Image: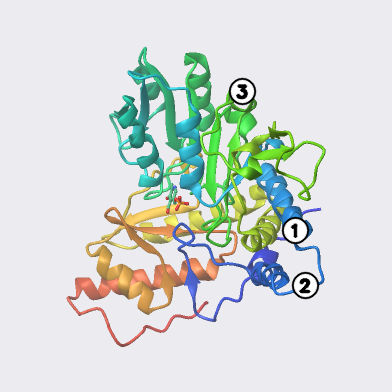
Amino acid sequence: MNKPIESLRNAISFPKGVAYLNWASQGIIPNGSLEALDSMLKLRGRTDVDIVGHEFAATQKARELAARLVGASSEEICLTMNTSMGINLAAQAIPFEPGDDMLLLATEFPANAVPWHNLEKKGIKVRHLEAAGRHITPEEIESQIGPRTRALAISFVQYYDGYKHDLAAIGSICRSKGIYFAVDAMQGLGVCPFSVREIGADFVSCGGAKWLVSPYGTGFCYFSPRMLESTDWLPGCGWLAFEYIGHDFSSIINVERRAFSDARRFEVGTLPYHDFAAFNHSVGLLLDVGIDVVYSQVSRLYEGLVAGLTGISDITIVSDLEPSARSGILSFSSPDDAGLCDFLKENQVFVAHREGALRVAIHGFNSTGNIERLLTATAEFISRVRLRIKPCRNRAIRIVND
Ligand SMILES: Cc1ncc(COP(=O)(O)O)c(C=O)c1O
């Protein structure tokens, strides 16, 4: 049976009066995860335990939990240390030929652009997708796939306004056109339901530091069965990509070795095991509640935020409110976004100022009180701007309903 959503809120020590709505920048690491990290790290100071056994158990568990998050099997997951590592693996594993091209939105977060542009040095062209409206549609993507297009890379959720792409429709187009499909899932996993089987992606890369409320240094990448079968050249290669046939670590030189047949062959060397111990606790918390339950809670809070913002003059909601396009991120603009962001921070409401709007990132750890606090402070700021009162620098407003 799933744990109640309240178990998330209880997992973090939020100081009274703080509304943390900035998960799209950094997740807050739950107390139990910090303890798990600490326990694993402390093993490094001991002489009387099988440290490696504990460490390898932690990474195997991390692959299993990551697999559950994306609806894959653990053999299809390799651990990385951030999103960019996985995207680089994808970019290098796709069998591009000089003269091929790949498609990308010009508005991608650079983590999902730089590794692809790096291919330009090998004669691969990166073409920017063009959309008539604010967001690209699957039909527009289909019409821009050309005879030399080999791949498409896109974010699950756009980092600046939270637009959730229809990955099932995009994946189906990629399959019908025979092109590789790579997904940067950093801004959606942990808060939005996701299934690789439904979208048919070849690669999904995600870091743990945001919505997965895990330490820096954690991440993973999913490889589809066809990529696992076809990638015999290792885009990054290291000793832990291999099994040393018939041997444990007591003998690894001058013995036959073979690259793992599963996605572990894309892991290259020792990993931050203590960080993965924390990742296991954090992702376990989310999965125990259920990502669909987290998403329902977030959707309820999102609804309340939309209703409240609509009632405040001079506020424009930037995000697409179509239900299927909603994620944990809602962006809005005001007459002075930078000023409002600072004012909110002074009042213990944490959001981010991104690409000409305020980005509110709501997770299952949040409460109605957090949204009310954001709305009250925003209304206060707007009324001060309208009355041309300098928004209080030193005097925090009093807000009930924490
Ligand atoms: C869509 C997206 N991908 C990736 C990242 C981060 O990449 P990495 O985990 O490699 O630091 C971010 C934000 O920092 C992001 O918004």
Residue shown at 71%/36% (left/top)? 75
* Cα distance in 3D space between marks 2 and 3: 43 Å
Residue extending farthest to the top is 147
Please state which of the two labelled residues, at mark 1 or mark 2, is closer to the viewer.
Answer: 2
Q: Which residue is mark 1?
A: 52
Q: Give the vertical position of 124 relative to 161 (above or below).
A: above
Q: Which residue is mark 2?
A: 47
Identify the mark at residue 226; answer none if there is no mark. 3
**Neighbourhood count class around disc 1 (C-alpha, 10 Å): few under 14, some 14–19, many 20 upward:** few
Residue 73 makes an appearance in the image? no
**Neighbourhood count class around disc 2 (C-alpha, 10 Å): few under 14, some 14–19, many 20 upward:** few
**Helix or strand or loop: what does disc 1 sit on?**
helix
Q: Nearer the viewer, residue 283 or 230?
A: 230
Residue shown at 28%/29% (left/top)? 132
Mark 2 or mark 3, which has the lower sequence index? 2
**Left or right, residue 3 beside residue 306:** right
Q: Nearer the viewer, residue 393 or 274?
A: 274
Residue 391, percent from left and from top: 25, 78
Residue extending farthest to the front is 254
Residue 38, percent from left and from top: 67, 72
Residue 301, percent from left and from top: 53, 58
**Left or right, residue 71 beside residue 26:** right
* Cα distance in 3D space between marks 1 and 2: 12 Å
* Cα distance in 3D space between marks 3 and 1: 32 Å
- Report whether the residue tagged 3 is closer than 8 Å to ligand 1: no
Q: Give the vertical position of 166 relative to 376 (above or below).
A: above
**Helix or strand or loop: what does disc 3 sit on?**
helix
